[in-house]
Image (cartoon, rainbow, N blue to C red):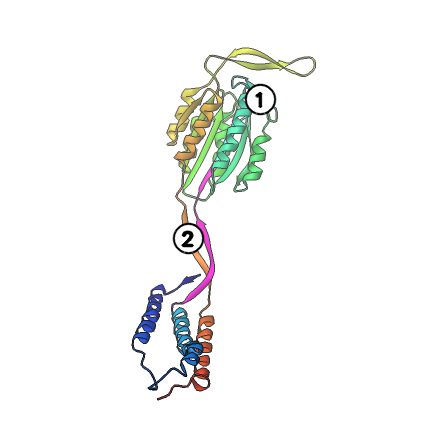
Amino acid sequence: MTFARPLLLLLLLALPLWWWRRRRRRTPAVRYSDIGPIQPVARARRWIGELPATFRSLAVGAWILAAAGPQWGADAVEVTSEGIAIVLAVDVSSSMLAEDFAPSNRLDVARERSVAFVRAREHDRIGLVAFAGEGLTRVPITTDYAVLEQAILDLRVGELDDGTAIGTAIAVGANRLRRAEGASKVLVLLTDGENNRGRVDPRTAAVAAKAFGIRIYTIGVGTQGEARLPIGRGPEGQLRYQMMPVRLDEPLLRDVAESTGGRYFRATDGAALSRIFEQIDQLEKTPVQVTRFRNVDEVYRVPILVGFGALALELVLAATLVVRVP
């Protein structure tokens, strides 16, 4: 319970003071030369004589509580935020099966870290684009994080034509973001290769993205030098691996990111990829405005009725059981 005018409760301190002064100034109503015969009766019924003053104090105290504006209710919080519109563009080309992020391959780690990144956001709208030789929107920009997380976990190599179409991925992501509401729009592009497919030049796509106010963060994944890459399938359909040179066009990814005001990161293991997503998470934070309000009911009627009831009892007692002698 709270009070609309809590300072009025200080008036309750006057009641103990009134009782103290009342006891100090008490004078006998009738003078007797010998009170011995009536003293036992006086002691037995003294509490009855105090009832009118008690009920009067109760009435005054109840009315002070009513004047203070007692309120009963619960807090509610309304969160207002423009949030950030984010698109995750994840490479699902066959090279993402490289097993240099032991004990997992690149795609497994990318899925795991992407889900962790989504769970770290609270008020943002996020979409998912998968790309290889072509780009495809898996989840439009949404706040349904459960659907988004499942779509990330469902990313598979082989669902799109093989290759790495970085320019197409940027174009598909930018097309999703350009009509998104909010002051900040971000494309996080994760790849492990060079742009070798698609008709859209990545740098040209980045210029167009910047025109729509989109900032791009690029992440190059994979070890330096060589990695164990799939080169085909065996007679029973199992993947065949071979140590192959790693080709990652870092200058391109850096140019794409920096031209839009973003940053380029290089992840050579799962821990590094986690730190990169954490850095992006910190770079792209939006202040959240919290409005707190209370849904309350005024309960002043109860103490008012209690006060009137106490006053009525005082008047009845003063007219019947406790009669003052002039």
Tag 2: Cα neighbours inside 10 Å, few (<14), some, or many (≥20)?
Answer: few
Of the pair 300 and 17, the residue shown nearer to us: 17
Of the pair 30 and 246, the residue shown nearer to us: 30
Instruction: List the single residue furthest toward the right.
Output: 236
Question: Quick one: label 2 or label 1, which is nearer the N terminus?
Answer: 1
Q: Is residue 46 above or below residue 123?
A: below
The image quarter containing residue 40 is bottom left
Residue at x-position 41% and y-position 40%: 184
Residue at x-position 54% and y-position 39%: 145
Q: Quadrant of the N terminus?
A: bottom left
The image quarter containing residue 98 is top right
Label 2: which residue?
291
Looking at the rendered structure, the kind of residue marked 1 is: Asp
Using the rendered image of the protein, determine whether residue 125 is visible from the camera's viewpoint: yes
Q: Is residue 39 above or below residue 165?
A: below
Residues in magenta?
68-86
Using the rendered image of the protein, determine whether residue 216 is visible from the camera's viewpoint: no
Q: Position of residue 191 (x, y in %)?
A: 49, 24
Q: Is residue 30 above or below residue 249?
A: below
Q: Nearer the viewer, mark 2 or mark 1?
A: 2
Residue at x-position 40% and y-position 28%: 257
Secondary structure category for the residue under label 1 = loop
Q: Position of residue 85 (x, y in %)?
A: 46, 40
Label 1: which residue?
162
Residue 211, magenta (yes or no):
no
Q: Quadrant of the C terminus?
A: bottom left
Residue 81, magenta (yes or no):
yes
Of the pair 209 and 245, the residue shown nearer to us: 245
The image quarter containing residue 60 is bottom left
Q: Main secondary structure of the magenta part?
A: strand
